[in-house]
């Protein structure tokens, strides 16, 4: 048994965002006493936390979303990975690595619900970047909704992000022509030269319509939407008949009080398009199947990743704004 300290830090959500950057006024940093371990419980020292765009929805007051919002005064929701440091649970031993929803906290008391052991001998950053939400989301969205076929054209927005980069690599591994939309030349070079994308569009500097037409001469069969924004309209116009649009995220609209207008729906009828939104909580029961699908790509060296690591619990507060600025390079992770 080892307890490093008698108190620990956690961050509670105390106010809702109203548009614009995320600021410290939304949160409260609190000190808590390390809890006593009851029968069937164990204590986890969290080592790395994942920051995800879904958090903007979790902070909102929307009670009709796919998951209830974080209650004001509660620890901010997030997934993470850590080590069991004390246990009265038959299935979780001291030293076990575990992953799951633990929140913005240095320590987490659990009865095992929602936490899974991590058996893979990989660093925490690799686990959170590939086998946690990013890889599961990419696998579910691309294969179950996108239903790609060899030789088709796939366009991915947010292509240098944690989900988009994996979507594109899965597409390339299955013989698709893959085009990524990014916000910098560095990211464009990374997805083409390192990840193997067939082309990249820098939405900040390129003529989007012209570049998209150049890179997708046969039109677009699958569009994996992570961002929203102007690219959405241009892609919509180039969708082929029976095309599939996978709506995973709209980060460009999350900080706006009034979201941008979506494309005209007439092409949905003319081209018989399928457009489907999805969120991973609906598919948590499918995780073993998704991992079975994803793991061979990883083991064959077909999936690369990079992580953007912030240091210290409090860095999570301002770190969320990197999603809006696009200055993050890879999966956003907080090291505790």
Image (cartoon, rainbow, N blue to C red):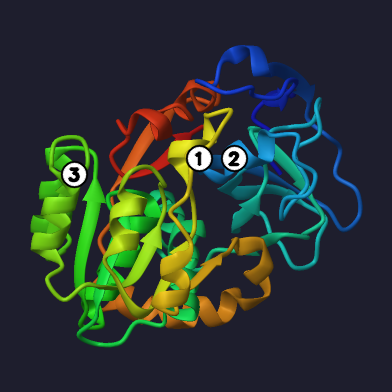
Q: Which mark is residue 55?
A: 2
Label of residue 187 in the image: 3
Locate residue 138 relative to residue 11 in the image: left or right.
left
- Determine whether the residue tagged by mark 1 lies in a helix, strand or loop: loop
Residues at discs 3 and 2 in contact (Cβ within 8 Å): no
Q: Secondary structure at mark 3?
A: helix
Whole-number angstrom distance, CA of label 1 to CA of label 3: 19 Å
Q: Residue at x 34, y 81 (%)?
A: 241
Q: Position of residue 186 (x, y in %)?
A: 13, 40
Q: Is residue 45 above or below residue 214?
A: above
Figure check: 138 above or below 107: below
Between tags 1 and 2, which lies in front?
2
Give the crowd class for mark 2: few <14, some 14-19, many >=20 residues within 10 Å.
some
* Residue 162 visible in the picture: yes
Looking at the rendered image, the quarter that the N terminus falls into is top right
Question: Which numbered dot is residue 51?
Answer: 1
Q: Is residue 81 left or right of residue 126?
A: right
Mark 1 or mark 3, which has the lower sequence index?
Answer: 1
Q: Are marks 1 and 2 in contact (CB under 8 Å)?
A: yes
Rendered location of residue 13, percent (x, y): 72, 25
Q: Position of residue 190 (x, y in %)?
A: 15, 50
Which comes before the other along the chain, label 3 or label 2? Answer: 2
Name the one closer to the observer, 127 or 293.
Answer: 293
| Residue 331: image location, x then y, percent | 38, 46
Which residue is at a point 8% across and 57% down the rendered structure image?
193
Q: CA distance from mark 3 to mark 2?
A: 23 Å
What residue is at 49 percent from the left and 76 percent from the top? 145
Characterize the local packing of mark 3: few (<14), some (14-19) or many (20 or more) Cα atoms within 10 angstroms.
Answer: many
- Which residue is most to the top? 25
């Amino acid at each position: 048994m080892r307890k490093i300290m008698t108190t620990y830090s956690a961050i509670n959500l105390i106010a809702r965002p109203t548009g614009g950057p995320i600021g410290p006024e939304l949160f409260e940093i609190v000190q808590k006493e390390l809890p006593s371990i009851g029968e069937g419980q164990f204590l986890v020292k969290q080592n790395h936390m994942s920051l995800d765009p879904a958090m903007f929805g979790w902070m909102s007051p929307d009670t009709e979303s796919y998951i209830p919002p974080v209650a004001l005064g509660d620890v901010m929701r997030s997934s993470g990975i850590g080590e069991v440091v004390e246990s009265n649970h038959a299935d979780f031993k001291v030293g076990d690595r575990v992953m799951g929803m633990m929140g913005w906290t240095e320590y987490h008391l659990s009865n095992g619900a929602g936490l899974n052991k991590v058996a893979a001998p990989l660093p925490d950053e690799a686990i959170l970047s590939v086998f946690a939400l990013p890889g599961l989301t990419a696998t579910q969205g691309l294969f179950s909704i996108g239903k790609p076929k060899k030789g088709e054209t796939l366009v991915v927005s947010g292509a240098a992000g944690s989900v988009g980069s994996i979507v594109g690599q899965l597409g390339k591994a299955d013989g698709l022509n893959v085009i990524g939309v990014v916000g910098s030349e560095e990211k464009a070079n990374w997805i083409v030269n390192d990840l193997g994308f067939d082309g990249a569009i820098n939405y900040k500097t390129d003529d989007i319509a012209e570049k998209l037409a150049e890179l997708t001469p046969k039109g677009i069969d699958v569009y994996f939407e992570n961002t929203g924004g102007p690219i959405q309209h241009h892609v919509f116009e180039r969708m082929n008949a029976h095309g599939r649009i996978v709506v995973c995220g709209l980060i460009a609209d999350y900080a706006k009080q009034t979201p941008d207008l979506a494309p005209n729906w007439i092409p949905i009828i003319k081209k018989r398009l399928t457009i489907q939104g999805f969120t991973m909580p609906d598919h948590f029961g499918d995780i073993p199947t998704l991992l079975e699908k994803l793991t061979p790509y990883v083991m064959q060296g077909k999936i690369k990743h990079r992580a953007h690591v912030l240091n210290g619990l409090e860095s999570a507060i301002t770190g969320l704004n990197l999603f809006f600025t696009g200055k993050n390079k890879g999966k956003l992770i907080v090291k505790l």
